[in-house]
Amino acid sequence: MALAGLFLVVFLLVHLGINLLLLANDDGQAFSAAANFMGTNAVIRVMEPVLFGGFLLHMLFGLLVSFRNRASRPVRYQHKSLSETSPLSKYMFHSGIIVFIFLVLHLIDFYFIKVGLVAPPAGVERHDFYHRSLALFADKGYSAAYMVGFLFLGFHLNHAVQAAFQTMGFNHSKYTGAVKAGSTIYSVIVAGGFMIIPLWFMISR
Amino acid sequence: MNFTLKIWRQKNGADKGGLVTYEVKGISPDSSFFEMLDMLNQQLIGQGIDPVSFDHDCREGICGTCSLYINGRPHGPLKGVTTCQLHMRSFRDGEAIFIEPWRCGAFPVIKDLIVDRSAFDRIIQSGGYVSVNSGGIPDANAIPVPKHDSDASFDAAACIGCGACVASCPNASAMLFVSSKVSHLALLPQGRIEAERRVQNMVATMDSLGFGNCSNTYACEAECPKEISVANIARMNREFLAAKVFAEKEKKVSFSL
Ligand code: FES
């Protein structure tokens, strides 16, 4: 789960980089070029199934571990736990479910249209991610849901990145502080970076 | 001081059990938590009621026998102490105090607040032996040990095996306990000889006994009466991964006369 998660962490940065090109004031040229590159480059094509595998493994292990963990305490406490815990670490399953729902909707909105599983809306070519994004972000409700999705992804990542290091056996008296800070900075950059895009469209239009 | 106690009563492992409310009055703020329970039991015996069973032995925080999940925290509200070191001045006068046994499938309730923690003994047993030469007492510094390693080893060895880590963990995971037992040996040259085998066996036993998995909430570290660090868990993960990936196949020896 931790290894697959760390792999997804790298993917998110690439995805964010490309999405930020949406903000370039060039009528979507840079973004479309990048999307086109991702859709045609041989290495990226090979990585696509690997990425799907990474998501599947991460979710499968996550579910398995969560169910086993619940089963390990068949009789629960009457008093609610007041033990101090790492922020939001108890809610990884919940934030994971919200991110999963968002991911499914996201795939329906983009990926399924691209591969032809879902018909594109009238007037948008199925490979034209730029105009598809513009149309979606023009909808205030969609933009709000999009931002909520990333807010929870941010909560998830804030704990996840440093926890993955710990699980892989990395805990060092000198560097763990930096790993924890890095984890928080990374989650703010990813969640904030993705959320800026709908905000920008809301303000600029 | 007066308190309302809500105590888990359960006749035996098969009984369903439930919380029962008792009132205790005139408790000195300087009496220990167990003295308060002793007074309650005296009162119950006087009324012809079966006294509350709870584990305790040294009553000075070194044996790891005492337990009790008090108001949502193992060993009560203070940091770095066992229940036997807790005093009633840590509570408010008139406060309702919930007292429950450790909860984990691998720690079945025997009676009331007493749970069977022999799962921990089984994990220790599966770790096997440490090779030491018999004979004369070796010179204290015959084997040099880096200062940091000996400090970290002694910190891990401070674990008294009470099970508060399991009790506090949202997943009832035993990782802090097992990792401190793995660490205090793995950090010293004397413990390196069987280190690979030890970590694999202890983790396998821990998993087979039904403890949960670590999701890094670090509740264990916050509640450990000996303040054992989760750095030990990372060390155990490291040892385990390295052993799984790099351990050489052991040569099978067939004996013939
Ligand atoms: S009774 Fe020995 S540690 Fe509490």
Image (cartoon, rainbow, N blue to C red):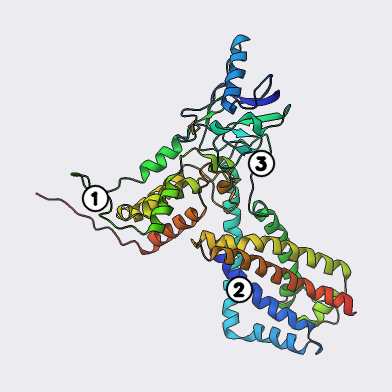
Residue at disc 1, CB closer than 8 Å to ligand 1: no
> In the image, which disc is placed on residue B105?
none
Tell me where residue A109 sits by quadrant: bottom right
**Residues at marks 2 and 1, common chain?**
no
Q: Is residue B115 left or right of residue B91?
A: left
In this figure, which residue is indicated by the disc labeled 1? Answer: B139
The residue at 61%/60% (across/down) is: A59
Q: CA distance from mark 2 to mark 1?
A: 52 Å
Q: Is residue B207 above or below residue B162?
A: below
Along the line of sight, the residue nearer the viewer: B26 or B229: B26
The circle on residue A10 is: 2
Residue depth check, mark 1 versus mark 3: number of the one nearer the observer: 1
Q: Position of residue A98 (x, y in %)?
A: 73, 59
Q: Position of residue B1 (x, y in %)?
A: 70, 24
Q: Secondary structure at mark 3?
A: loop
The quarter holding residue A141 reads bottom right
Residue annotated with mark 3: A81
Q: Is residue A32 above or below residue B170?
A: below
Q: Secondary structure at mark 1?
A: loop
* Vertical side of B114 occupied by B213: above or below: below
Residue B192, visible in the rendered structure: yes
How many residues crowd around disc 2 within 10 Å: few (fewer than 14), some, or many (20 or more)? few
